[in-house]
Amino acid sequence: MNLYSTRLLTAISLAGALAFVAACSGPSSSLSPTGPSATTASSATGGANFSPNPSEPPPPPPPCEPPNEIDPTTGECVPPPPPPPPPPGDEGCTPGYWKNHTDSWPPTGYSPAQTVGSVFAAGAFPSLAGETLLQALQGGGGPGTLGAATILIRAGVAALLNAAHPDMAYTRTAASVIADVNAALASGNRDTMLALASSLDRDNNLGCPLN
């Protein structure tokens, strides 16, 4: 082999070696676990593992505005207690006053021509149920349960007008007068009816401010 052929083979071998070295030392970031793809995957999963700070305090409760107040036992904001009931009244007009002063009736909401049966449950005493409230105020009494019921209705009508008048400080409410009279009438007992009539009569004589 001459010198030219030897040099040619040497150059070919050297070129092949250089090509091999270049192939082995090329970019490898796409194969690296720490390359761009790995960084992207880490970023994608990083947000999923985020959680708020568990030690962060809760927001404060809204302020307790008047008239509400703080309950010393529970510390909660609660409404104020209801006002106490008004003191018992000390005024009352008699059946005679209401019989002779029908001009004082309108504020009560009741009419002299209204029947007893439209206000009280007097069905057991039809003759009384059919009377007007004004006629009932003129009633007297009599024996037996009818006589007791007549006395009771007379006192009951006056008590009802006293309780219903806005300018009267009566010791009873209109609802309680009606309920008590109805219960006594339903008992059918003379003594029960007379006992309530006596109690109502005392209240009806406390003093009339409408005179």
Image: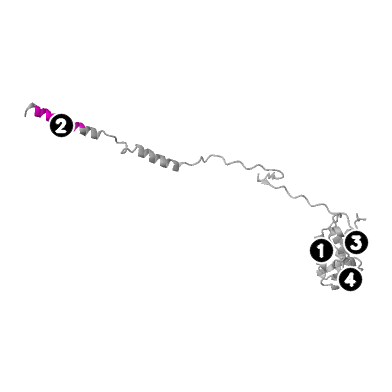
Using a 10 Å C-alpha cutoff, classify the residue at mark 4 as few (fewer than 14 neighbours), some (14 to 19) or many (20 or more). some
Q: Quadrant of residue 117?
A: bottom right
Q: CA distance from mark 2 to mark 3?
A: 139 Å
Q: CA distance from mark 3 to mark 1?
A: 20 Å
- What's drawn in magenta, residue-wise? 4-18
| Residue 101 is one of the magenta-drawn residues | no
Give the mark toward the camera: 1 or 2: 2
Residue 124, image x, y percentages = 82, 72
- Which quadrant is home to the C terminus? bottom right
Q: Earlier in the sequence, mark 1 or mark 2?
A: 2
- The residue that mark 4 highlights is 147
Label 1 crowd (10 A; few <14 / some 14-19 / many >=20): some
Can residue 147 be seen in the rendering of this structure?
Answer: yes
List the residue tagged with mark 1: 178
Name the amino acid, label 2: Ser
Label 1–label 4 contact, CB within 8 A: no
Instruction: Name the residue located 35 percent from the left edge and 39 percent from the top edge.
Output: 37
Judge whether 101 appears above or below 190 on screen: above
Q: What kind of element bears circle 4? A: helix
Looking at the picture, which amino acid does disc 1 mark?
Answer: Ile
Q: SS class of the residue under badge 1?
A: helix
Q: Position of residue 31 (x, y in %)?
A: 30, 39
